[in-house]
Image (cartoon, rainbow, N blue to C red):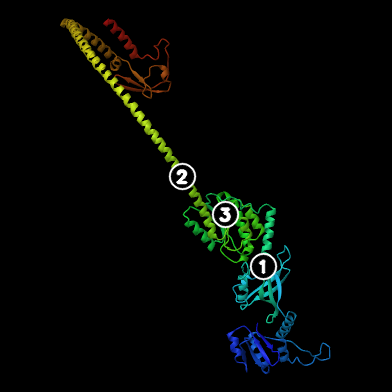
Amino acid sequence: MRLIELDSDRRRLILRFPYDPAVVARVRELPERRFDREERTWWVPCQHAHAVADALAPHGFALAPEVAALLGGAEAAAPNDSSPAAPGPTFRVSELNAVVRHAIEEAFPVPVWVAGEIAGYDRNRHRRHIYFELVEKAEGEEKPRARVSVVLFESVRPRVERRLAEAPDPFELCDGIEVRLRVRVGLYEPAGSYQAVLEDLDPVHTLGRLALARQQILRTLAARGLEDRNRSRPLPALPLRVALITSFGSDAMNDVLQELAQSGYAFSIAVFDARMQGRELKATVAAGLEHFARRAADHDVLVLARGGGARTDLVWFDDLDLAVAVAEHPLKVICGIGHQRDQSVLDLIATSVKTPTAAAQLLAARVREAEGALVERLARIAGGARAVVGEQAAALRRSGRRIALATGARFEAARRDLEHRVGLVVRGGRGALRSARSAAHNRVDRLAAAARVATRLAGERAARAVRALAPERMQVLFARAGRQAAAREERLRALDPARVLRRGFALVRDGEGRLVTGVDRVAAGDDVTVQLRDGELAAGITGIRRRPEAAPPQQTAPQWAQQGHGGRDEVEER
């Protein structure tokens, strides 16, 4: 705040303002200015009031009421005329704001304590001077019923932060928490706005309110039987399929992934991106819990991971709806939200570790424990197997020796029996060979005798056959065969169509060249060809006369002639 005040002896003007090189340079140009090193303020004699006001007004300096009165002659007595037209003091805007500020300061001469919920702090925390609001809300309502502007000046901020760090449970100021502040009530004259200037705070009040809200949530969960439901779920022996709710790309996410990767086990991680701080935390974390609840069969365990932060960051985790969702979740929930000293409601109803890295280490240790148990069981199985194999090997060796002895005896008996049988076979074979040789000799003699008899008989049959083939007999047979051949040749010549045609016969063919053997093969008007011995005639059928006594249609003249001649030949031959 930049202000021109009048000191108590009304002889000097006091200039109050935060350090600004431009303002300091302008003040150094004022007549008779001096710097008070103890008060850290500048002062100028009152006779230069107009010069001071004119020089510093462009820099936003406000005038205290007594200075405004000094400059405007307000010390003159007010007129007795009370009519509206009567002359009276006229204030400039800055003078009016100065008078109001002075009145507020008289009403609140010392700082007061005020309690309320912080709003608008987070978006301004990066500024030199932090401007925010302190609001009052009715139970169960989100809309404030009253609010006041608060400013935390840069010069006071280190003291406030030191108080927070020295609290029994250190925390930071943030939106949504209730605080008890010691403020100096005043007016920001350039804007004419009423505000409270923060000078100190009560950390115990905030921590008490947070603890009270947390206890209320825990009592509600206990009444519903949900306080220990998820925490009592056993951690799976092999939690390799991990569902992770965290801010995507955050240090917490990287710590979990790196730790699980370094474990050497085949973890499968599904990440759901959520806001792990501020007003969006509840909605996004609740969405992640619901997402993995629908896919519980695909995962073994659920991890809530968030990096370190202030105690007041936990206020967003102290929510009844989130607590119920975690308590009723079908997966075992592990909270690693990065707080070393305090815990949220979710930490108290689920399995809690201090950091995201610790959550990953817990999972890796669980798998390592299962691996060790498996290796131990395998070692016991291997040891038992070796003992059993040793016993069986010894029994097998004993059985082998017994079998070897029994087998040797049996082999010896079998060998003797085989030698005996071989002797019998050899002796029997010799006798059989002698018998077979004798029988073979007998058979050869019989075959030789039979061959001689058969040869004699064959010679006799050959002699008879030779006699039957005497020349005179053969001549008779040849003469008979010649006569038969001549008769057959004569019949063939008689059946020759040319000879038949020479005797006056003719061959009739239809238009397609087929032989006409009867009147039923043609009709009146058909064209026919008549073949004679020396040529052919083209003729047409003009009429047909049938003879009942004629030969059957299927018999032709050559056939009849063949039959006749054949009969005579046959008679002559016989």
Number of labels in the image equals 3
User: In what element is the residue under mark 1?
Assistant: helix
Above or below — where is 292 with respect to 252? above
Instruction: Please name the amino acid that badge 1 sits on.
Output: Thr
Residue that badge 3 annotates: 302
The residue that disc 1 covers is: 206
Mark 3 or mark 1: name the one nearer the start of the chain: 1
- Label 3 and label 2: CA atoms lie apart by 30 Å
Within 10 Å of disc 1 (Cα), the crowding (few <14, some 14-19, many 20+) is many
Secondary structure under badge 3? Answer: strand
Categorize mark 2 by other alpha carbons within 10 Å: few (<14), some (14-19), many (20+).
Answer: few
* Residue hosting label 2: 378
Front residue (pair 71, 486):
71
Amino acid beneath label 3: Leu
User: Is 397 or 41 nearer to us in this picture?
Assistant: 397
Q: Earlier in the sequence, mark 1 or mark 2?
A: 1
Which of the 4 image quadrants contains residue 534? Answer: top left
Residue 574 position within the rendered picture, expressed as x and y whole percent measured from the top left: 27, 4
Cα–Cα gap, marks 1 and 2: 57 Å
- Secondary structure category for the residue under label 2: helix
Of the residues under marks 3 and 2, which one precedes in the sequence? 3
- Give percent across and percent down for residue 50: 67, 92
Q: In the rendered image, which quarter is residue 247 located in?
A: bottom right
Whether residue 471 is situated above or below residue 250 in the rendered picture: above
Residues at discs 3 and 2 in contact (Cβ within 8 Å): no
Give residue 165's quadrant in the image.
bottom right
In the rendered view, tell whether residue 536 sits above or below residue 159: above
Considering depth in this image, is 519 or 149 the residue closer to the camera? 149
The picture places residue 131, in percent across and down from the top left corner, at 65, 74
